[in-house]
Amino acid sequence: MTNDWRDDRIGSALRGENPTVLGETKAGFAVIGDTQFLPGYSVLLSRTPGPTALAELPRPERVQFLADTDLLATAVERACRRVGEGFTRINIDILGNKDAFVHAHVWPRFDWEDEVRRRYPVWLYDGANWSDPAHALGPQHDELRQAITDELAAAQAEFAD
């Protein structure tokens, strides 16, 4: 049995052991994606480990999760505009088809993507992008990671209740 933080992303975040955490929100943990073939790719993990679908959260938690997804999307957009090249927009996906925990994907999109790819969901990219070591999260992403962290804190302060 492996003791890898990836085996329990929410639990490892709750324990302070998930190295991809960018910051906390009311509903969860903003994390930078393990893969960065689209630089700035981030995910909001629910802080509630049991539910496997958004609809399983009580309505107040569900609404807060969606609001916090917007905060993360705002942070990624602002960071990518500031330090990225060719940023055009954000795509948000809440799928839950593969991973059995509530989470939302925040995908930045860029003008340097192949035109055909740019017009369709990220999930139509070749599956190798998710495991290609050339796209793995690493020190080369530190500046963007810090920018997203800073923008998340700024967005939380700006939109505080």
Image (tube, grey):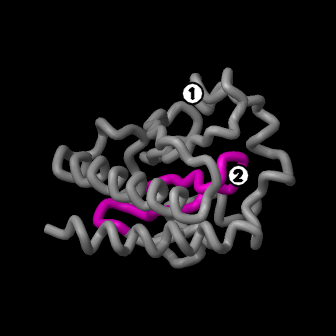
Q: Residue at x 86, y 53 (%)?
A: 133
- x and y percent of residue 96 in the render? 49, 36
Image point (72%, 29%), residue name: 114
Q: Which residues are magenta?
A: 25-45
Which element is circle 1 on?
Answer: loop
**Amino acid of disc 1:** Pro
On whether residue 146 falls in the magenta region, the answer is: no
For the residue carrying disc 1, how many other residues have a C-alpha within 10 Å: few (<14), some (14-19), or many (20+)? few
Q: Where is mark 1, residue-wise?
A: 121
Q: Quadrant of the N terminus?
A: bottom right
38 relative to 5, above or below: above
Image quadrant in which the C terminus is located: bottom left
Looking at the picture, tell me which residue is in the foreground, 60 or 125. Answer: 125
Q: Is residue 146 above or below residue 83?
A: below
Image coordinates of residue 3 in percent, x first then y, are 71, 67
Residue behind mark 2: 35
Q: Can you name the residue that lies furthest to the right here?
A: 133
Residue at (38% x, 46% y) in the render: 51
Query: Residue 9 occupies which quadrant of the picture?
Result: bottom right
Of residues 93 and 56, the one nearer the viewer is 93
Q: Which amino acid type is shown beneath numbered disc 2? A: Thr
Percent from the top left, x then y, of residue 101?
47, 46
Does residue 138 appear to the left or right of 120 in the view shown?
A: right
